[in-house]
Structure formats: C-alpha cells, structure tokens
Image: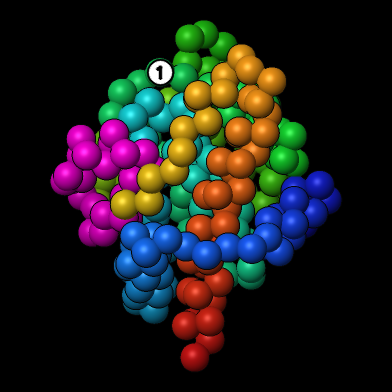
Amino acid sequence: MIFKNLQANIERIQNLPFQPSVGQISEITKLVNWLVTSYQTGETPALNFICTHNSRRSHIGQFWGAVIPYWLGLPPIQSYSGGTEVTACHPNTLKALADFGVEITALSEGPNPHYQLKFGDDIPTIEAWSKLYSDSANPQNNFAAIMTCTSADEGCPFVAGATARISLPFTDPKHADGTPQQDEAYLQTIQEIGQVMLCVFKQVKVLLAQ
C-alpha cells in the first residue's frame, strides 16, 4: 500500500486542471503508444528519464515512472534516470520528494551518495544517485528515453539502445535554490512532471482495457 501522505498528494495532483501544450501532446501520444505496444507484447517497459546532471528533473521523472503504474493498478514498469554528466542527486530534490511523501534512506556517503526511495509497504523501491544515462545500471537497449531538460534534449539527438526518444522538457527548479521560493519551485516541478505522467499512464490503462 502506498504511504498515506504520498497517496493524498497523488490524488491532489490528479485533480488539478491540466492541459498539455501542443508540443507535449504529440510526445505524450508517442510514449503512450510505445508503452501499450510493450505491454501487449508481454514485455516489461523500461523508461530512462534523462537530463544534463541527473540531479533534479530526471530523478523526479524516475519517481513518477515507478509509482504511477502501481497506483493505477497497471503491470509494473522499470523506471531509471541518468544524465549527460555525473554530479549528485541534489539535496533539494530529495527534500521535495520527502515532503511529498516518499521515504528516503541514505545508502552511502561521499560526493555522489546513493539513496533508497520507498513509496509504501510491499512496493519495490528504487535507488537514486547521479550517473550517466548509459551507465550499466540503466537499460542498454529496448527502452524509451525521456528527455526532461532542453539541454539534454538538444545535446543527445540520438540515444543508443533506445527504441523511442520522447522530448518532454520541464522547467528546472534550480533557479529557486537558496531563495524563499525554493520549496514551491520544486513542488511545482513535481506537479508538472506528475501531471504529464498521470496523463500518459491513464491513457495507457484505457487502451489496454479495450
């Protein structure tokens, strides 16, 4: 069962008004079709959320990719993240996810710590740390690459091994770091990515039921 606070926040986000942009609509449709095809062929879909530093938006995307299928009662998927550079999962990202209802445990120390993200009892956890999108911990073929920032989107026109490349850039909450607007900015990013991914997986669920 999903943690109570996390469940309440997911429900709150799904009830917010949402109208995808013209650019998002075509990419959402592409991802929906790829996921449906993967499910129908008996595969476990793998998503790799990619941004430049693998420190903020890609980790938030990985979180949503892991939790929404479970929340909707869909078959599981494999959700990953990576960057074009290695830095660290930013502390503000971890704080925002913890405030949202995710239980976070540090697994290691150092300049690029590993963290365990837990969403509820009897739900598979995911591990978060900064790594290249091509890292051996990530899928090497037959996955969908979801570009969550403009820089990575422009810098990686081709992602080796990906059978789908989805362009869904989001605003970087980094601009608010160290300001009074920091928590609000990170929550906004969580909401924006969450609304898009809810839209994706709800369509997938409808199509699989037909």
Say left or right for 75 vs 37: right
Reading the image, the residue beneath label 1 is: 87
Residue nearest the observer in this picture, 191 or 30:
191
Q: Is residue 157 above or below residue 28?
A: above
Please indicate whether residue 13 sits to the left or right of residue 74 in the image: right
- Residue 122: % across, % down: 72, 52
Magenta range is 143-166
Query: Residue type at mark 1?
Result: Thr
The N terminus lies in which quarter of the figure?
Answer: bottom right
Q: Is residue 103 visible?
A: no
Residue visible at 57% across and 19% down?
A: 177
Q: Residue 164 at what x, y percent from top left?
A: 26, 59
Q: Nearer the viewer, residue 73 or 189?
A: 189
Seen in the picture, residue 51 relative to 10 is either above or below; the reply is: above
Instruction: Look at 37% across and 64% down and name the residue there.
Output: 22
Residue 46 visible in the shown view: yes
Tell which of 28 and 137 is nearer to you: 28
